[in-house]
Image (cartoon, helix red, strand yellow):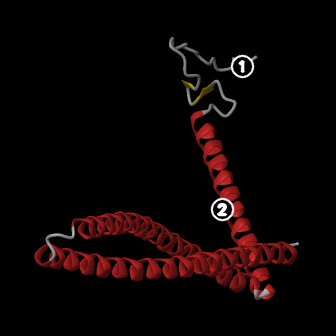
Amino acid sequence: MALHRGRVILIVVIAVLAVSLWRMYLVELEKQQIAASYAKASRLVEQLQGEHKQLTDQLVNARQTVEGQAGRIGSLEQDLQNVDQQLKETLTELAALQREHDELRRNHATLTEQFDAVAAERQQLERKLSSLKELKLAIREVRRQMWNQRWVAWRARMEAQRQADVDRLASGNRGYLVRNGMSTVRASSQLQVHVLEPQPQ
């Protein structure tokens, strides 16, 4: 029965380990995808920042050198506004990806702790179930301790009963109402009993 219970516990632990490993694999895969998206977004941000700087420089140069090209300046300003808007959107996406990445890291740490706890519990169960001889010796030792406790309790009860009997015997009158001319009955009113000597016939 104990061996069957041990096998069931071992199967449950293995199942929990398998689920934990699968979840860790999924989290790791998602983390890699988010890291790739994060890197791509970072590259896009760098590219957009470069374009922003380039357009800013072009705008400054255009304002300094070509005063009559108002349409070109307006187009450059519109491009700059578009790049600014795209940069803001990309930065917002990057912040969301960073939050998701942090959340996944926390989940990964939690799963790692759960996996370590399950692995430690599995090792402990394997150690307990590895030796039936040790298990039988432990059961025998528990039974011996229980028998010793029962024996000590029985001896204590017998000793208490014996002491109570001695106390009752010492405080009792042992069947005598009068002994050595004194009453053995403890009462609130003392009775005077006189024993007459038998008269010769």
**Closer to the camera: disc 2 or disc 1?**
2
Question: Looking at the rendering, in which quadrant would you find the C terminus?
Answer: top right
Q: Is residue 127 above or below residue 34?
A: below
Q: Is residue 156 left or right of residue 83?
A: right
Residue 59 in percent (x, y) is at 20, 74
Residue 175 in percent (x, y) is at 70, 30
Numbered disc 1: secondary structure: loop
Residue at image position (71%, 60%) is: 150
Residue at image position (28%, 70%) is: 76
Q: Quadrant of residue 191?
A: top right
Residue designated by label 1? 200
Residue designated by label 2? 152
Residue at image position (39%, 79%) is: 42
Cα distance, mark 2 to mark 1? 62 Å
**Which callout, 2 or 1, points at the residue further toward the start of the chain?**
2
Q: Which kind of residue does numbered mark 1 sit on?
A: Pro
Question: Looking at the rendering, in which quadrant would you find the N terminus?
Answer: bottom right
The number of numbered badges drawn on the structure is: 2
The one nearer the camera, 177 or 40, is: 40
